[in-house]
Structure formats: C-alpha cells, structure tokens
C-alpha cells in the first residue's frame, strides 16, 4: 500500500477499482470526467477487464450500471449534477427496485457554475429518492467513501449516492489505498418481482424502501464520516462535506472557541444533531450548495439559533470559502490588492482554427438576409458562438434543446427556424427531437457541427462518429436534404449556398458541418 498524489476524482476511481468494480458507466461532464478517464487508463482496470467505455448519455449509463448490478457485480456510474436530470428516471426507480451487486452513483456538483448552467444540489435527489448520500470532505475520504458505499450498498440492497463538488474533484492530496478486492462473481437476481415495477410489485417495493429508512438513519448515527468535535462553547458549527475544511481553517487560523459537528453521510443523524444543537446557543450551518439541511434544521427547532445561507450569515450563491466562514464569525476578511485597471478581462473564445468559427461565419452571411435572425443552439464548444465576434446563437438551455426549440419556433410560424447541435450532443439527446420534427414535417434546418469528438470535456469519443448521415436518414430525413460540407474559409461561398438552399426547403433538412476538432487533430498528429 503506497501513497498516491491524486485528484479527488482520481481517488474515487482508484477506490472503486480497489473495491472490486466490474464496470464504470458515464457521459463526460466537468467536474466528473476524470473519474472514468482514470479507470480507462488504469493498467489494473485493463487487466481485470473493467468495462470503461463512454455511454451515449447519463440515462443509458445509469441503466447499464443497473444491469451490471442485476447480474450481481459491482459498478459505479458517474456524471455531473445536470446529468442527473437526464438520469433521474432510472435513478428514482432504482430506489424502489433496489440492487444486487453494489451500485454507487457519483455526482459532481458545480457551485459557482464554473462550467455549468446552474448550481443545483444533488443532495436534493438523494432526499427525493430516500437513498443514502455520502459527501466526502477530503480526497482520502472520497477514496474511503466509495469503498464504504459499495460495501454498504450490497449489504442494505440500495444504490448509494456519492456527492462531490468541483473543489474536491479537481484538487490533489495524498491517498493511502486499501488492498485490492476481488470482483464479484456472476450472480444474477432470481426474484424478478423486485425488478418488475408493475403497480402490484412496485407498491410492495416502495413500502420496503420506506421500512429501511430507520436503518439508514442509524447508519448515519454510527457513520465513521460523521464526527463531532465538541468543546465547552456556546457557539457550534454543523459543517457538511467540503465546508468542513473551510470551517476548520478559520477556527485554527483565528484560534476560535467553537464546537464542530462534521456530517458527510445522510440521511441526517437525528439524535447526534439534536444533541449538538441543544448544547449550543448559536449554530452556523455550513453546507456547499443549497441550504438543504439548514431548512430541515430550522423546521426541527423553529429557532433563530440556526444561521446560515437563509438568513444571510453565509452567501446564498456560489462556492463557500474561508473568508465567508470568517465573516459568519464576525471576522473581517484580510485586505487584498485590487486588480489594476489595465488588466482587462479575457472572455473565453473558440480555438484558433476551430471549424465552428467558419460555420458561424457562413451562417452569419446567410442570416443577414433575414429579418428574423434567431438561431437555437446547444451545449458544447459552439455555445461560444453567442459571444463576440460572432454573436450568432440566441439560446443555450440544455442538452438537445437546440433541435427541439427550433421545432417549437417553427410550429409557432418562425422562419428561418435553425437549430445547431454538436455531434456528441446529438447522440446524447438530440435524436428524439429530430424524430419529432420528421414526424411533424416541421420546417426546420438542423445543423450538426461535427468535430468527431466530445470536445468541450477534453476530446472523449463521440458515439455517432462516422454514422451521422445514416442515422438521420434512418429517422426519415430525405436523403437529398442531408447535406455535408467542410466549414473552412476556402469553401465559404459553397457553404453559404448550401445553407440558403436548405433554409428555404419546406421540411426537415440536416446539414452536417464536418471538420475534426483542431485540438484532437494536434494530439493525433503528435501520436503519429
């Protein structure tokens, strides 16, 4: 057993390998991507035959992990917080079916929205599904938690959620691993009534889920990850997960006389929390994300002693940090130097030589000929087409919405109705929207900006590479209106002509703007 200097994401991956998983299922999404990538590159994972290819989306990933669990083997499924919205259907229902082989969902939340559309807190999903949630405060705990979760998942027969945030995922610490555990043998479920969620069976399974709740609370009461540091003080802090680090930094820096209850396993250990709160006159609740448990504690006690995000003691949005915690104790933040006026902010931009640039240039030429210049887009590198110098796109809401919003606008009578989607996003959640458009014979022009990779998250494989034309034709798009061009300056006039023709076609047309991601091309050349 040697020490390893690992990212939190990598620590989780190593913990899962050492705990005997047989598969990891995921769709890349910052800040969770490195978990799967670590397993894909691991020689031990390769020797053990651990399944580690990317899934089309988070829903298919979760369902595949559930299938491996049904077969009796251990698996993890990884995604970012908004990815859990996509996987919510199988996730919620898996709390009713239960599991056989250990199954842990690892969700990476992104407070402050470093690379996301919102700050949603995945612990809400854990409460929603009545499932146990672990929230490590350190990289070592992240390693330990995934091992504990896989073990307890099998013992109690439920999926576990492991919730991390950007800071845990993307910062490094030394990890002391445990001995490598053998993988489970193939041992499929024999009681099919657990897994067939027809009403008669589902009602019994739901009652079973509710009957387990006292046991889950007791597990939290005895959890090695819930630790109390009580001293003779009237001031207490209940610190959840990562927030514990910020609290301890402030207490140690300023030599504060404060008791701390660290909680990293849910549901809430009720007895432990009630005893702690009763022993202190004032309680600050420090949690990264929504005031999930602050709200619950206020409901328990209906007492102004509970302070946190809801009353302004801590900020309601963004990541916590030691300065926020210090301010909650009435300690002024250390004076910092202001940024000089000559330092100009640099907004993100598309890479030099990126094919998206030439696509937007061609599209802007065509759109200048119309009064209505709205273009519905999607999540990917091409979202930067909303910024200068292009300012081409008008929307970016969620994965696949570029196609379906264009269809809805066309249904409302808007022309042109143009949707832009990337190749990876198209296979993730754009296919069904295109099928809706085909079935309704909508007057839409869908542009698939195909750079043959999942570029925004680091260049992972894209599920539809080399097959987009056949997929669109298979869904019923007329072959003559599936057009392919290379977005490059030397073909600007030709590409503008194709765009004009297809925008005026009274039906569904698909234009595949196909050019390899410049960063992937550079890496491929270096490999050669």
Image: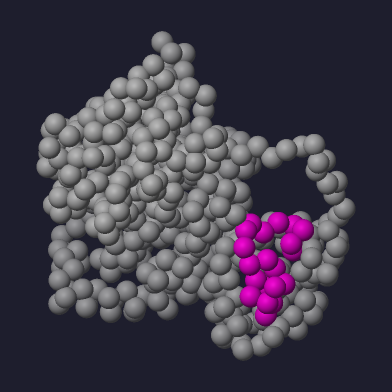
What stretch of residues is rendered in magenta?
306-325
The quarter in which the C terminus is drawn is top left
- Front residue of this view, candidates 527 and 229: 527
Q: Seen in the image, is 410 located left or right of residue 30? A: left
Q: Is there any visible trace of residue 65 in the rendered image?
A: no
Q: Is residue 426 above or below residue 281?
A: above
Q: Seen in the image, is 425 located left or right of residue 4? A: left
Is 407 covered by the magenta stretch?
A: no
Residue at horizontal 43%, vertical 59%? 161
Residue at horizontal 30%, vertical 53%? 414
Residue at horizontal 27%, vertical 76%? 206
Toward which corner of the image does residue 47 lie, by quadrant?
top left
Q: Is residue 211 above or below residue 452?
A: below
**Colouring convention used in this rendered image of the protein:** one colour
Toward which corner of the image does residue 214 lie, by quadrant?
bottom left
- Front residue of this view, candidates 129 and 85: 85
């Amino acid at each position: 057993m040697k020490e390893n200097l690992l990212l939190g994401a990598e620590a989780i991956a190593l913990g899962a390998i050492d705990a005997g998983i047989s598969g990891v299922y995921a769709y890349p999404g910052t800040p969770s991507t490195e978990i799967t990538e670590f397993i894909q590159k691991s020689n031990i994972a390769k020797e053990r035959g651990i399944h580690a290819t990317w899934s089309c989306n988070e829903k298919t990933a979760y369902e595949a992990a559930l299938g491996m669990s049904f077969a009796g083997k251990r698996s993890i499924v990884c995604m970012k917080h908004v990815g859990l919205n996509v996987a919510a259907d199988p996730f919620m229902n898996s709390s009713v079916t239960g599991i056989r082989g250990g199954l842990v969902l690892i969700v990476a939340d992104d407070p402050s929205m470093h690379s996301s559309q919102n700050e949603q807190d995945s612990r809400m999903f854990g409460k929603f599904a009545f499932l146990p949630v672990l929230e490590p405060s350190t990289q070592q705990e992240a390693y330990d938690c995934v091992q504990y979760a896989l073990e307890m998942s099998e013992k109690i027969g439920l999926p576990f959620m492991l919730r991390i945030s950007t800071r845990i995922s993307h910062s490094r610490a030394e990890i002391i691993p445990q001995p490598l555990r053998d993988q489970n043998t193939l041992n499929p479920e024999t009681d099919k009534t657990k897994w067939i969620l027809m009403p008669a069976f589902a009602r019994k399974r739901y009652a079973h889920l509710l009957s387990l709740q006292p046991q889950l609370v007791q597990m939290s009461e005895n959890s090695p990850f819930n630790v109390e540091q009580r001293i003779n003080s009237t001031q207490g802090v209940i610190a959840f997960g990562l927030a514990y680090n910020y609290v301890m930094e402030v207490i140690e820096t300023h030599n504060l006389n404060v008791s701390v209850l660290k909680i990293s396993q849910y549901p809430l250990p009720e007895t432990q929390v009630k005893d702690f709160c009763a022993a202190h006159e004032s309680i600050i609740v420090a949690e990264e994300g929504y005031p999930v448990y602050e709200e619950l504690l206020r409901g328990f006690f209906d007492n102004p002693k509970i302070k946190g995000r809801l009353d302004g003691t801590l900020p309601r949005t963004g990541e916590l940090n030691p300065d926020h915690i210090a301010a909650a104790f009435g300690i002024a933040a250390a004076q910092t130097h202001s940024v000089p006026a000559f330092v100009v902010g640099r907004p993100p931009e598309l890479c030099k030589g990126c094919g998206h640039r030439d696509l937007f240039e061609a599209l802007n030429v065509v759109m200048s000929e119309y009064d209505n210049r709205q273009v519905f887009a999607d999540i990917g590198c091409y979202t930067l087409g909303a910024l200068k110098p292009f300012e081409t796109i008008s929307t970016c809401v969620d994965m696949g919405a570029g196609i379906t919003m264009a269809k809805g606008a066309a249904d409302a009578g808007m022309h042109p109705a143009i949707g832009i989607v990337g190749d990876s996003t198209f296979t993730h959640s754009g296919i069904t929207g295109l099928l809706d458009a085909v079935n309704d014979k909508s007057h839409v022009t869908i542009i698939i900006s195909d750079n043959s990779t999942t570029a925004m998250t680091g260049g992972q494989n894209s599920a539809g590479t080399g097959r987009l034309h056949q997929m669109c034709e298979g869904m019923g798009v007329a072959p003559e209106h599936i057009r392919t061009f290379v977005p490059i300056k030397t073909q600007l006039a030709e590409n503008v002509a194709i765009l004009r023709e297809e925008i005026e076609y009274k039906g569904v047309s698909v234009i595949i703007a196909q050019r390899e991601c410049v960063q992937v091309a550079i890496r491929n050349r270096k490999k050669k």
